[in-house]
Image (tube, helix red, strand yellow):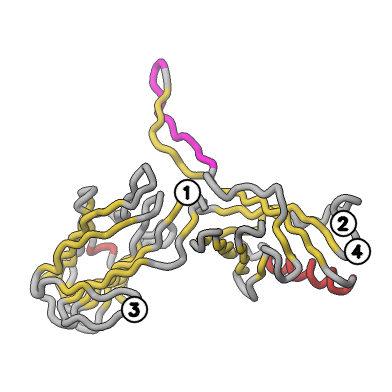
Amino acid sequence: MTEMTVVWQPPTGSPLNLSGADNYQIVLPDDGWYMPPTSLILDYYETHAMVSRVRLEPRILDLPIYIDTQTQAGFVAAVQTLINAFNSVKGLEGTLQVTRQDGAVRHIKGIYFTGLEGSRSQDTYNTLWMEMPLAIKCLDPAWYDPTAKVFIYTTAAPTNFFPFFPLVLSAGNVFGNTIVTNGGSLDAWPVWEVKGPGTNPLFENLATGKKLQFTTVLQVGETLVIDTRPGKKSAVVGSLNKFPDISVDSSLWPLTFNDDGSPKDQTVSITMSNTDSNSEVKLTFNERYLSL
């Protein structure tokens, strides 16, 4: 495992380096880095069945951990630190972050599954070292690029914004069309932030024909936040739920992907009337991947 840097961030507490620092090292055979398991959802007919859709199942990461210390007291402390870092009693997920050989960084949410029971044998234990077959269960099996893609659309004059510059589109009624690229191998779910003033914001993915339309008026200083991510899905202005303002033919649509893994360009249309120099739309998403 020396070819990758692997760091576990517990739900609370300090990160733990599992790739040769902090007394811990992932050893072979490890498993689960690449394709996740799937389930086939079938439609049944008189003579046969057909695949209706494919569902990604939770990913199990098998990461045997070798603990190596110089003293008995150090060994006891290292084991306790590992146990504390993977304590799942509260049902909270941690984050495993991996830096690949090429420098790309990916992370995945997970929760302790099994392996830290402490089975001791001549091959796996002595008073200064131990090997534990740690397994982490990832309910969302996708790997994420932790660096979000951010696009800002405004009718104001351009100002510096790192790492992106605002895209200055036409003022008044239409922000305009723009090309957004999803470089991942799974759907990417955007978060929209719409700053008023503005009336009836409409977001369309012209590549898929999907739209998200609101019948609402935003005043100066108000921000509509739309989170389309699975498990998060919300539309609020402050604490006010704005789901009732969504049209019946709308959907919280994703940015889709190419089957061959190549980046997919798609035209996104953003429309809102009664805007001025204070109006702004911010699109944020993290690319998702089937494989590390």
Distance of mark 2 from mark 1, alpha carbons? 35 Å
Q: Are marks 3 and 1 in contact (CB under 8 Å)?
A: no
Which region is colored magenta?
37-47
Q: Specify the amino acid type for callout 3.
A: Phe
Q: Earlier in the sequence, mark 4 or mark 3?
A: 4
Q: Which residue is mark 4?
A: 127
| Residue 43 covered by magenta stretch | yes
Measuring 49% from the left and 56% from the top, which residue is drawn there?
143
Residue occupied by mark 3: 162
Identified by mark 2, the residue type is: Tyr
Q: CA distance from mark 3 to mark 1?
A: 29 Å
Q: Earlier in the sequence, mark 1 or mark 4?
A: 4
**In the rendered image of this protein, does residue 203 appear above or below residue 171?**
above
Compare marks 2 and 3 and give the one earlier in the sequence. 2
Mark drawn on residue 290: 1
Residue position for label 2: 125
